[in-house]
Amino acid sequence: MYWPSYPYQFYGRNYYMGRLIGEVVPYSNAHDLMRLGRDMQEYPDSMLASLNIQPGMIVADIGAGVGFNSLRLARLVGPYGRVFPTEIQPQMLNHLMMNAYMLGLSHNIIPTHASHFDANLPYNSFDLVLMVDTYHECINPPALLSGLHRALKRNGRLVLVEYRLEDSCIPNMPDHRMSISQAKMELESNGFLLTQVYDFLPWQHILIFNKI
């Protein structure tokens, strides 16, 4: 089936390539991002270990929320690396930096206010861009992906971690999950190549793309 290559609206909701785009989780629900039990649902340390993140790397955490993964990334890249958490909601970034200060991790975290259309990242700077439970909420994927493509270094990786649409037992609403085939279609239409898939997490795909 042919789908438009641009985002569009239908009955007040946003779509892209036939997919209903999920609505952004508001700051009023920020407590859920650091909820007890999330570690057991998402295995964040195992997820990050699979990405072979090394000290000194420059990484971005798109849609970072209040720091669930950014704080872990800051430890992994060490004092000479940098983590750029991005958020469209300033309250999320303020909360994230408060958490970072409390843990002594603020020295290598650079909070970045983004928009729906631009992650606001410097060009040709990043070894890895991570999007955990985020991409499905982007209302203009081509615009966002264009900026991420420019931000990545030549051999940089873009990693999507998304709840599996293929698994009907996962409780999230369908517009907050993605299939491998849908993610592949969308990103490969925007300058990326799917190079690896991990499915060892309880509920999520790890989809690794390289810029082309």
Image (tube, helix red, strand yellow):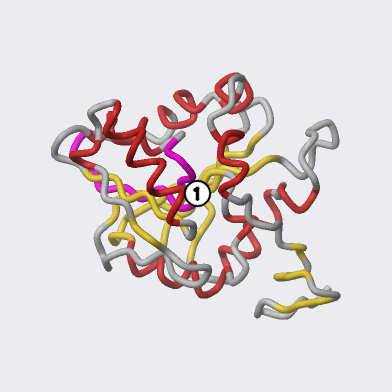
In-image side of 143 versus 128 (left or right): right
Q: Identify which amino acid the numbered label 1 is placed on.
A: Met
- Regarding residue 66, the answer to whether it shows in the image is yes
Is 59 one of the magenta-colored residues? yes
Residue displayed at 27% across by 66% down? 122
Mark 1 crowdedness (10 Å alpha carbons): few <14, some 14-19, many ≥20? many
Q: Main secondary structure of the magenta part?
A: loop
Give the position of the C terminus as an image quadrant: bottom left
Residue displayed at 65% across by 80% down? 6
Is 5 one of the magenta-colored residues? no
Q: Nearer the viewer, residue 108 or 31?
A: 31
Q: Over which residues does the magenta segment extend?
A: 55-67
Residue displayed at 48% across by 60% down? 88
Helix, strand or loop under label 1: strand
Q: At which x and y percent is residue 48?
A: 43, 31
Q: At which x and y percent is residue 44?
A: 49, 28
* Relative to 145, residue 180 above or below: above
* Relative to 148, residue 46 above or below: above
Q: At which x and y percent is residue 206?
A: 56, 40
The residue wearing badge 1 is 131
In-image side of 68 versus 8 (left or right): left
Q: Nearer the viewer, residue 197 or 116?
A: 116
Number of disc labels: 1
* Relative to 103, residue 10 above or below: below
- Regarding residue 53, the answer to whether it shows in the image is no
- Quarter where residue 202 is shown: top right
Q: At which x and y percent is residue 188?
A: 56, 65
